[in-house]
């Protein structure tokens, strides 16, 4: 199974339209476009699961960089959730406060 990330989607793209983009390359098992919890509006990216790895690779190669809804798609293999690390915030800043002054 190949899990594919599709970014830079038009906010008007439906899950059915996304499915139709990928179906020429093979069996599409699942499609999901993420939405904002409060507004229900598309967040501009989604995921497509394809049953066959080779078919998924062909879809990625064919669709990455193509235009849809006036936008250039970013299509690549999705990283497992464990690869997404929080960071860049919090933690020890080497003894300095936000203004760069030494706290010691």
Image: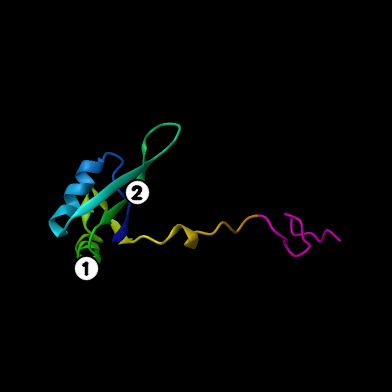
Q: Is residue 69 left or right of residue 84?
A: left
* Residue 59 drawn at (x, y percent): 21, 61
* Residue holding disc 2: 45
Identify the image quadrant of residue 27.
Answer: bottom left
| Quarter in which the C terminus is drawn | bottom right
Q: Is residue 69 something one can see in this rendering?
A: no
In the picture, the disc for residue 54 is 1
Q: Residues within 10 Å of mark 1 (few under 14, many from 20)?
A: some
Q: Residue at x 17, y 48 (%)?
A: 20
Give the alpha-carbon distance from disc 1 to disc 2, as whole Å. 22 Å
The reply to whether residue 36 is visible in this rendering is yes
| Residue visible at 28% across and 53% down in the picture | 48
Image quarter of the N terminus:
bottom left
Residue farthest to the left?
24
- Counting the numbered discs, the total is 2
Magenta stretch, main secondary structure, is: loop
Q: Earlier in the sequence, mark 1 or mark 2?
A: 2
Nearer the observer, disc 1 or disc 2?
Answer: 1
């Amino acid at each position: 199974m190949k899990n594919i990330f599709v970014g830079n989607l038009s906010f008007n793209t439906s899950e059915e339209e996304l499915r139709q983009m990928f179906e020429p390359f093979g069996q599409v098992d699942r499609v999901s476009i993420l939405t904002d919890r409060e507004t229900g509006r598309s967040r501009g990216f989604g995921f497509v699961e394809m049953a066959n790895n080779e078919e998924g690779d062909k879809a990625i190669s064919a669709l990455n960089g193509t235009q849809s809804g006036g936008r250039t798609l970013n299509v690549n293999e999705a990283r497992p959730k464990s690869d997404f690390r929080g960071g860049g915030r919090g933690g020890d800043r080497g003894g300095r406060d936000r203004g760069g002054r030494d706290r010691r």
